[in-house]
Amino acid sequence: MRDIDYKDKGGVLNPLKNLSFFGRKAVTVPLEPRPASANYRGFHLNDWETCIGCSTCQKVCDNAAITMVRIPDLPEDPVQGIRNLRPAIDYGRCCWCALCVDLCPTGSISLSREYVHTCLDSELDSYFVLPDAKGIHGTPYPKGWAKSEDADLVALERERMEELEPAERIGHFQEIVAGYDSNQAIIEASRCVQCGMCFDACPTHMNAPEYIRAIWKGDPEQAVREIYRTNPFAHTCGRVCTHRCEDACSVGHRGTPIAIRWLKRYAMDAVDHERVKAIAAEGKARFLSGKRVAVVGAGPAGLTAAFDLIKQGHEVTVLEAQAKAGGMVRYGIPDYRMPPDRIDRDVDVITSLGVKIQYQTRVGKDVTMAELERDYDAVILTIGLWMGRSTRIPGSDSPRVKRAVTLLRDVADQVKVSIPASVIVIGGGNVAMDVARTVARLQKQTFGAVKVTVTALEDLEHFLADPQEIKEAREEGIEILDARGPQEILFKPRKYEVDKVHGLRTWRVLSIFDDQGRFAPRYDEADEQIHEGEMVIEAIGQAAEVDLLGEDLTERLEWMRGRLKVDGQGRTNLPWLWAAGDMVLGPDVVSAVADGHRVAASINTYLSIQEDAA
Amino acid sequence: MIEGAVSSYEKIKAKTSLRDILDVACSFEASARDFYTDLIPKVGKNVRWVVEELAAEEQEHLDLLSGLAGREDIAEQIKAEVRTPATDSRFSDCVHLPDLGPSPDDQAVLQYAMGREQIAMEHYRSLAESTAPGPIHDLFSFLAGEETKHKTELEKVYYEVVHSGGV
């Protein structure tokens, strides 16, 4: 700058200097954007293979620059936690803050180092972009700001919950897990990104983001209110729900899913029971419809339907064969997973609304279906799956061979059950694990040692039991042998007595399903084993005890491959009769709750139409 | 084959022409179909689907064998079929052949049906093994393969009915 005399304005011939350019070849200097820095926040990139369409990016964007666009060709599966949505960016709004990157649960979004985009007025729409992995112009640019450990706003690790060690828990039936305290619950709730994948996956569409947010705000009462909007078996589902919400949780793609079930449990335990009852009663009709509904079976489906119907102003009577309510949750799930006092609370909330339960009333014996049809405006069958199936292999008809559901019911009813020092369980599902772990506790109490062997046709990959159940069973000293096909129950002849069970003979199962996923076992007969045990318990499957319907009604009803045929609302072919829960859908508590809501809505409509017609 | 009766085994063993053997095999299938058809009204409506499907399957089997018996090129057809033998999964080996009684449940009916197929399969196999290579040997192998396929299908249904609903 010092070389230029600022006062020098040139001489009078200066304009003529331009003439010196005549005849020279024109030179074009290319104008390229300068390379951006490694962490530059340029246009978005989105790896569609990794993106699950959870919409977290959209929710976190304060400028509302992100719109989720449905792409019909992409897969959508709520159970797997996959939506066919992808984020589109409005660069008229985006401020390149990169919160979408930092909070993306899967890490699919990043920013590139590309930052130039120009267009004509007629192309202004080109600032609204559906980014993919190739970038805004399809030109490969390196990544700029991307997910890093320092900038990741997703907390990947779950807040630990205290639980009893195997040695501490095996000698009794006390609950294994301790539950979160309020600090732990708030920390765990703070991990939630509020994407709502859990809502999609939940059979009863619990609004988990809402109750998790309430917990995070330190307002468990509001959480309970949100929970009761869709689930009156809240204590139960807070402990033994199959938590599909967690399987679909977007945080689970890179870390541990939010402990949604445990958060529900926290909220329910944190709020005084009388307050829970008051919250549950909110919105109850202040009139009586004059309609009467009978519910057969006081399990989750039946009592959920009863809960809804009583709130809608109908009179509801539940007929229960057992001495207590809760169905399979009470009589099939051991106390160390589902403490009975919590079932009592769920039931108490429902009865506090006015639902009447007639205990030890067996339909088909104490009252007939014909009487229910005559005396009530609508009847719901929710009788569960109380009949345990048998393998019917040689020896299985012996009185020394037990069914899992019967044994679990006896234990829950505090009937004295005599358990020998060595037991074999046949089955690979949750019932098999429940009965094996129950027997292990009884053995520990009686003999001071556990000797339970679980054998299942399926290999471990195809076990129906929850992996956590399998893990805990093994921790408790239970031997689990997969891919063993039961062949025969063996007996030791005894003088003057019924033969004593000696063990189970099995063959190795090489493979169990064919290409279509249907049963087609292949055995290795050379791999035969004898498993020693003085009792065999079968836990291979369950069925509904439909004898209570009686021959006439069984004939009038329509059936579908052994199960009652119902429509999408749970209604049978008879206008006064609905069916719901395990007997229709198979076993699952939260699905039973969803089904209870479904039939209640259908019945309420039916009764309203009756009312209008009257 | 009917419930493994020795008389059935001997009856078919005595036949020396392909058509005669197929006719006897057809009569066994017709007998099985009639058995299940008679059983339909005796079981509860919730179980009836099993028996109805079994009757329909036996009818299909009968149609297949009758169609084969009516062809001029039986030997060639059978030769082609036995080149891809069906595999016996042996699942039903250890399931009892139950006494059906007056009102059997779905599991008992399926056990019974699997037992029938098992015995029929074994008898046809035994007949094939005791016959010198040739068209009759091939026919017995074919019939054994058909029974095996049928049994395998029943095993699938059995698993879906029995090993489900609570595990």
Image: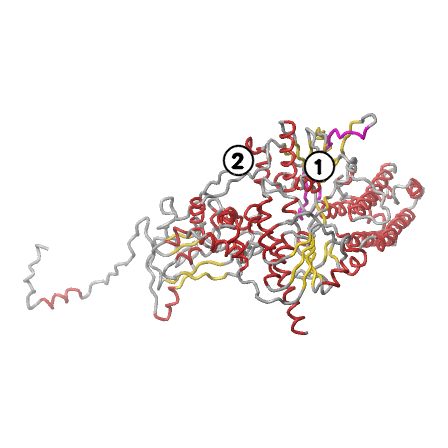
Tell me residue A611's x, y (percent).
66, 71
Q: Secondary structure at mark 1?
A: strand
Tell me residue A41's x, y (percent).
33, 54
Tell me residue A255's x, y (percent).
46, 44
Is residue A123 visible to us here? Answer: yes
- Are both tags, 1 and 2, on one chain? yes
Instruction: Name the quarter where the C terminus of chain A is drawn.
Output: bottom right
Residue farthest bottom in this picture: A613
Q: Is residue A495 left or right of residue A197?
A: right
Q: Secondary structure at mark 2?
A: loop
Q: Residue at x 77, y 29 (%)?
A: A500
Location of residue A156 by image quarter? top left
Q: Is residue A148 left or right of residue B31?
A: left
Looking at the rendered structure, the kind of residue marked 2 is Leu
Instruction: Name the quarter where the N terminus of chain A is drawn.
Output: bottom left
The total of numbered circles placed on residues is: 2
Give me the C-alpha separation between circle 1 and circle 2. Answer: 27 Å
Q: Chain of mark 2?
A: A
Residue A499 part of the magenta-drawn span: yes
Report the magenta residues as a range. A497-521
Q: Is residue A614 left or right of residue B17?
A: left
**Neighbours of disc 1 within 10 Å: few (<14), some (14-19), many (20+):** many
Instruction: Please give the residue where the numbered disc 1 appears in the rendered image.
Output: A537
Q: Chain of mark 1?
A: A
Location of residue B152 by image quarter? top right
Instruction: Please give the residue where the numbered disc 2 appears in the rendered image.
Output: A164
**As drawn, A522 above or below A565:** above
Looking at the rendered structure, the kind of residue marked 1 is Ile
Sequence order check, earlier mark of 1 and 2: 2
Q: Main secondary structure of the magenta part?
A: strand
